[in-house]
Image (tube, rainbow, N blue to C red):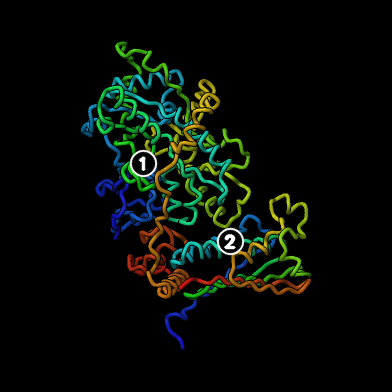
Amino acid sequence: MATYKYYHAHEVNQEACHGRMKCLRACPTDAIRVKDGKAHFISELCVDCGECITACPHGAFVPLADTLEGTPRKGKLRVAIPSPVLYSQFPSEVSPRRILRGLLQIGFDHVFDVAKACDWATLATRSYLKEHTGRWPIISSFCPAVVRLIQVKYPELTENVLPLQVPREMTAREAKRKLARENGISESEVEAVYITSCPAKVVSIRQPAEGTKSALDTAIAISEIYPALREAVSEPDSKIKDELFDDITYGPGWSSLGAITGLLETKRWIAVSGMSDVTKLLDDIENSKLRNVEFIEAAACLGGCIGGSLAVENVYVARSRTIRLAQKFGHNIARHEHRAERLYRSGFFSIESPIAPRALSPLDPDIARAIAKVKERDEIYASLPKIDCGACGSPTCMAFAEDVVKGYAELSACVVGAARAAH
Amino acid sequence: MTGERDIVLKEQFSVTGRDFGRAGSVSTTIKSMLKQIGFPPDVVRRVAIATYEAEMNVVVYADRATVTFEVTPAAITVTLEDQGRGIADIEQAMREGYSTATDEIREMGFGAGMGLPNIKKNSDDLEVTSEVGVGTIVRIKVLAPQ
């Protein structure tokens, strides 16, 4: 049933799947169906938010991030680009410096911190908002699941998405340029490895929404390297010099919701997280309800990237640590203002091509037949129990009615309807 | 002559005055149906905005309304028939910035006098008829390019 037109960050391990349907209810885009007791997902509907990975009690949704040992080196140098989320996964007494040092201990040749690029990108966002004359509000682009959701379900809103580079990509480009120059090698000899809490970013690296190549080569889950890194930070290697980390700014970056909006000059902003709330907000924007809002910071995971399904720490614990990290290191906005403005003018932050819609296939390519199918679907829906039990394998009675019209399901699969008819 | 081109989808919804919690749900439902049918994004957007504005007018000013949603391959028609105070001077209400909203409503971000003008801007054809003390009928039509 599913056509795998798009790359996804997870697959279903059919053996581990018990058909308990937790994923069916968790999926915000109704992409999952349970057939013969096993979960499947419809490729074009999946936005890689990772809700199914979190929801499954048996770990049947397997994230397809790379592993440190399992991935052959793709160049002479392997550089770690950890999402600032990584800092929040360790107790506060473990400093970012020690965590970066730990990454070198477990096999990376270099580390680059993303927090500085976050500050720059915040400044670039400010500049963009000041000059923007088109349609409002502008929606943040750092969360790939939100960007995909917009491409798939809100194609008209793709032009509202902030058309600027995201910090992780900027950091990877900077790292490659710098290390290639310093070591007299080509940029392609530098492998940029993103360490992330986010399954959607794994996809954004392999199949960027912007239609261009990602500067990142590999994506490794925080949960994957956590055990080794934990050991490394508890036994610091004295051979690795502290000075290596002196010119790093540190900071929480954009890992927690509100990091961008809190630093904007405009007060007309909304910060939203969690797929169902993001969806509601996008509906409001489409209805032109939020006319007076200039900027939306939107993250698919509750609480922001710290809530990602590939993180290990409880999101509220991580949030508390992130706030303390911000208090300690602060944001270095003022320090970069001049340089960021110059870079903004030079087009440094611009993405190569605008984000294009990836609209869902309609019920039928012919409008008249599509209308007839909607009518048929609504008639089927009217006859269903409307209790969204999921026993048929579709997430809701409405989705089931649609599956029947599309020929994906048989009306007889509705066991509740059949039982009621028998009485 | 009847044929596939004349296929009509017709649905009815209701809107309750002062129900701000559910306000906007009809236009969201209509919008998702139009997307599934496969109308161009611009058509969907215009119908959604016009319907939302009209729905909000019912929530803010009227007691209740029935919304009739009709679709053919060539056009989308949304008709809102409300029971409420009605509009005394339609011409005046169509002017940008004109509003009879109370301060309380304005504080909620409505009543900027943009409702009907915005509906007009987003529709290809708009009919408004009203009787004071009885109610208002707003008929919005958006054409779909063939």
Q: Chain of mark 1?
A: A
Q: Is residue A329 left or right of residue A51?
A: right
Q: Is residue B112 above or below residue A200?
A: below
Task: Name the residue at the top extreme.
Answer: A238
At which x and y percent is residue A107?
26, 23
Which residue type does callout 1 highlight?
A: Pro
**Quadrant assignment for the N terminus of chain A:** bottom left
In the rendered image, residue A364, in percent from the top left (x then y), is placed at: 38, 69
Please identify the quarter of the rendering in which residue A56 is found: top left
Secondary structure under badge 2?
helix
What residue do we see at 63% from left, 48% from top? A292
The residue indicated by pointer 2 is B49
A177 or A241: which is nearer to us?
Answer: A177
Measuring from the top left, give residue A305's x and y in whole percent.
Answer: 44, 36
| Image coords of residue A235 (percent x, y) | 32, 15
Q: Secondary structure at mark 1?
A: helix
**Quadrant of the image for the C terminus of chain A?**
bottom left
At horizontal 32% and vertical 65% (from top left) the residue drawn is A408
Rendered image: mark on residue A199: 1
Q: Amino acid at mark 2?
A: Ile
The residue at the far bottom in this view is B1
The image's mark for residue A99 is none
| Front residue of B105 and A379 | B105
Residues at circles 1 and 2 in contact by the CB criterion of under 8 Å: no
Q: Is residue A31 above or below residue B140?
A: above
**Alpha carbon separation for disc pair 1 and 2:** 34 Å
Q: Residue A374: in sight, yes or no?
A: yes
